Amino acid sequence: MIYLDNSATTKPYREVLESFNKVSTEYFGNPSSLHGLGGNAEKLLSQAREQISKLLKVQTKEILFTSGGTESNNIAIKGTALMYRGRGRHIITTEIEHPSVKESMEQLRELGFQITYIPVDSDGTVRVTDIEKAISEETILVSVMHVNNETGSIQPIKEIGQLIKKYSKILFHVDYVQGIGKVPLHFHDCQIDLCTISGHKFHGLKGTGALFIRQGVKISPLFSGGGQEWRQRSGTENVAGIVAMAKALRLTLQRQENSVAEMRKIKDFIRIGLEKIDGIKIHTPVLHCAPHIINFSIHDFKAEVFVHALEEKGIYVSTTSACSSKIKKPSSTLLAMGVPEEEALSSIRVSLSYENTMEEATQFIESVNEAVTRLRKVMN
């Protein structure tokens, strides 16, 4: 099997599964319980929070544990909007955000908030000047993803943060789900107020995630209950999953330091190979893009047909983002980049991890060539 759908989810590290099993078996107490078993669980929770905060170079109390990227984005956007609606009711985001951001925005629109979607250029990059033009006296939040989950384009987060710093009442949220472990991002240097990560995108387990909330920023809780996570996210913490996520993050950042150059070589090899195949158009920009994502279209082919053709050879890729892949609509990200609808409907995403090899990349290109040739014969 050659797994090239790592932007949808990653295979958990063996050490991560071992940590989860050990904590689930030996430290299964509720961290809110007063007895010793609960105390041990609470200690592990605190240690995991401290480890993650150090890895992200933030303060311990700035890490809020969640169930993943979707929840973190919802808490960041809705929690901020509801807390600061007295300041204003205008929010700025982009046309290429993840569905968890877009749908949160549309729910807020129903509550009377004004939402501005900023366009992107043909490389899928937002222009800082467009964000500046959209800012008004009513603006309270700007939300921009770091790495686009479909094309891999990197947004100018530091420049946007420097712009927003000029406006004291505007907060800055960044969806860092696709970038973490692949493209470094310093939260404080970029003036980020809220930042989303998801454990299963860096070889942790599904159902784990975190939200960075800069000290001094307040949110309106979306969950009411026992008051866990400093009363900002009620619900018994997934201690085993959180401990496993901390280990996954440490291991992934170690791999990033030692293996990101090799990942870029593999991606470049795949890109060059795809460019040689007649009828393929690559949508991922050459510059300012992540080292693990390549998005391309094949002329006159339906994306799902090609995905299944590669699956027959034991190769796994995807169409759009996993959250939208079963909805037969053209990629909104590609349409925002000016890609024709027909091409957007035929787009394929390849996404690497540090587990992938050059041998796998070679086999992938050979398989794409074979599949294109075979399918064209069938079509003709």
Image: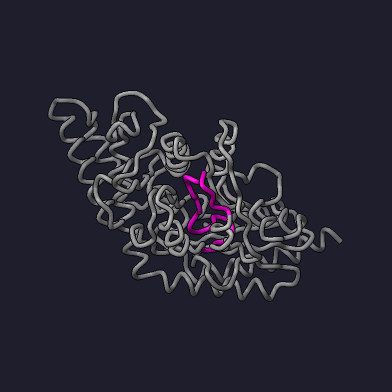
Q: Residue 291: give x, y in percent of width and height.
A: 49, 67
Q: Is residue 275 visible?
A: yes
Foreground: 188 or 84?
A: 84
Foreground: 13 or 77?
A: 77
Q: Residue furthest front?
A: 137
Classify residue 15 as left or right of residue 110.
left
Residue under the point 22% across and 49% down: 50
Q: Which residues are magenta?
A: 134-154
Q: Residue 200: give x, y in percent of width and height.
A: 42, 48
Residue under the point 54% across and 69% down: 361
Q: Is residue 215 above or below residue 130?
A: above
Q: Residue furthest top?
A: 225
Q: Residue 83: give x, y in percent of width and height.
A: 41, 35
Q: Residue furthest right?
A: 380
The overriding secondary structure of the stretch rendered in magenta is loop
Q: Residue 269: give x, y in percent of width and height.
A: 56, 75
Split into 4 quadrants, where in the image is the C terminus?
bottom right
Q: Is residue 348 magenta?
A: no
